[in-house]
Amino acid sequence: MSATVAARAPAPPRPAQAGLTEAEAAARLAASPPPAEDRSSRSYSTIVRANVFTVFNAILLVFGILTLAVGEWQDALFLGVVVANSTIGIVQEVRAKRALDALTALVAPTATVVRNGERRRVAVAEVVEGDLVELEPGDQIVADGTLGEALELAVDESVVTGESQAAHKSVGDRVRSGSFAVEGTGAFVVSAAGANSYAARVTGEARTFRHPRSPLERTLNRLLLILVGILVPLGTLLTLALWERRTPLAEAVPTAVAAVVTLVPEGLVLLASLTYAVAAIRMARRGALAQQLNAVESLASVDVVCLDKTGTLTEPALRIVELLPADGVGAGELRAAVGRYAAASPTTNPTIAAMATLASPEPEAALDAVPFSSARRWSALRFAAATDVLGAPEVLPLGPLAATADRLSAQGRRVLGLVRTEEPPAGSDRLPGGARPLGLVVLAERLRPNVRRTVAFFQAQGIELKVLSGDRPETVAAIARDAGLRTETLVDGRALPRDRAGLAKVAAGADVIGRIAPDDKRRVVEALRDSGRYVAMIGDGVNDVPALKAARLAIAQGSGTQMARAVADLVLVRGDFNVVPALVEEGRRILRNLQRVTSLYVTKSAFAVFLILSIGLTATAYPLLPRHLTLAASLTIGIPSFFLALGPSAGAYRRHGFLREVARFTIPAGTAAGLAVVSTYLFALNVVDLSLVEARTVATTTLIAVGLYLLVALESSSRARSAVMGGISLVLGSVYALVLVTPAARDFFALAPPGPELAASLAGAAAAAAGLWLVDDRFAPVPTGHHTSTEGAP
């Protein structure tokens, strides 16, 4: 039975507490302190801090202040870039926050309270002290209180206590907000709610223990550490060289600023977070809530998807297609027993909801109950005259009906057995004795629309799909086969190896694992993850939660339990498994685009290293002023990088060896750009005997020409994108030409007007730059590569 919460079945009369009245609840709510700010997404202050207070912004700010104090203000233009980048990042992340907050409201935790003696669902903020709150499997405990009822109630308190094992609760025990009901039912009287509850964290608590960094995030963090490690010694070396040469302060500051600022990839971190924010907005439009901003990028890295059958491959709703009475039992008697059981059940799920269609208008109350457990696979209700037990056919004494149940299960039907005994339930671990079969309840599941297309997409991308279900392996395999999944290797979850090595081998080869307990789902996911696979888990019920926690990427159905939604990185709000391929493509677009953007920024850093080591340590005037670099960086990196990061892309992608592939492009490209700039600058300065302003104009022009060529080279693997980037490069080149021919702009950037000698030098610069690209066979566009199934070191 799935633990997915559906509409509640009629409940037995409540002889004890009836909860508050509506008037009492309203009065207490008005007197309570205002609710704490919802932390479903990043706060505004966090967004501002993340985009403004960074190491690189601090470096740029220090050099900007030095420039304004000593040099010309035009050389501090890079401060405008910092402000613009930070502003764009803040605006986009605020947009993403608002979209996510609106979407979060659709899957926010709620509570079932008893008001005026009747059940009703209310928002967490409406729960007040004294409320009687009912619990079912998967419900989040949204306030502190004392249990007044507990029927086989087990509570996951890992957020509160750190203990991974569920704690069994009895009447009189305390419960705390942030924990979850895992099995059984109960009700508690609220002693502290809202801001007064435990740690004042009643929403999203189950996620605080996990914030997995995506592969790209870890790689970019490593890259930034490398660049800081290069920047500090080179900056120190340049400063010492300027000091030893007794360089005047008015010349030393622009030189140091030009050298160090070029080393800083000021927009790289911004563009990464900006891309995640834009992706989150796109996902929200598709009905997916990213509770971790990096979730969509992590999706692109997944090579194994483990999923539950019910609610993922099939619709969560069930229908009864047949009732098969046992020998000596009439069809009417079985029908009445099924309806009575559903009407008296203290909990509900899709199975009970389907059976409730047979309930009579006046249900009989149950005197005692043993709730369903995915571990024992049966539940029981004690009525006045007998005890009825509902469960999996293989755990019940069904006699000749057992063979019929096996046959129907092999055909893909969902089959439950119903037996009756005169004995009361003997406990939660042992079936009552003396049971006789009443019959079988045969239910049918429907495949979700377009699920075959979704499965085909995953298979075409080389992503393995493994179905983990509590149903019989044959039943699961029949549904999986209809959906287009491989079903060559079926495994019974009750026979899984206990040793890690044996389990890893079985998990790697299995297509379908049926009759699997919740903890074994977790073990299978852990075994795949520890063997180097990047594992995503898709689930909706309490029995999926341990596996969701263990996965690198947890995806929950929006129609699932509160507990499943709370631990997930990604929530499919509309419960539509078919949107996942679009999310995978979005993640791969991020990977492809950010690798190109990273290559641009790191090429600039490699160019800066070459320039410092080749000419910065000599007595020759530095070939570029900070304002030249600001102009060149804006035209060749700043503006194009937004098109590269946020535009569409296609083709394969590479996750493994990200830094190695970036270095393969940037080191030759940065070196070649440096050679082109230095050679043309020295040629213009010493051979053609141009003035310093004219020579710097040649150097700036060469740098922009090389940078624009790089944009086209980065897109050479795609004709369409190469053509688009070629057009953008022509437009940006025209902007630079406009700067050269406009006196005000030319003077502002300290450039020389075009003349015969300058034109000849520029032609020579263009020829030198082109020649470098032709003869340097080390340089090649970033290869798109292919997806690798091992994580490895980037």
Image (cartoon, rainbow, N blue to C red):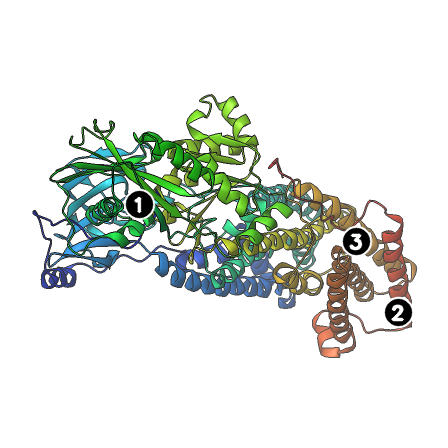
Q: In terms of image quadrants, where is residue 465?
A: top right
Residue 85 at x, y percent in the picture: 56, 62
The residue that label 2 is drawn on is 759
Secondary structure beneath disc 1?
Answer: loop
Residue count near mark 3 (Cα–Cα under 10 Å), binned few <14, some 14–19, many ≥20:
many
Residue 175 at x, y percent in the picture: 20, 41
Residue count near mark 1 (Cα–Cα under 10 Å), binned few <14, some 14–19, many ≥20:
many
Name the foreground residue: 680 vs 211.
Answer: 211
- Mark earlier in primary sequence (2, 1): 1
Q: In terms of image quadrants, where is residue 704?
A: bottom right
Amino acid type, callout 3: Ala
Name the foreground residue: 121 vs 781.
Answer: 121
The residue that label 3 is drawn on is 673
Secondary structure beneath disc 2?
Answer: helix
Which quarter of the rendered picture does the C terminus lie within? Answer: top right
Q: Foreground mark, 3 or 1? A: 1
Which quarter of the rendered picture does the N terminus lie within? Answer: top left
Q: Is residue 723 above or below residue 389?
A: below
Say if residue 276 shows up in the picture: yes
The residue that label 1 is drawn on is 138
Name the foreground residue: 601 vs 435.
Answer: 435
Amino acid type, callout 1: Gly
Amino acid type, callout 2: Ala
Residue 114 at x, y percent in the picture: 15, 55
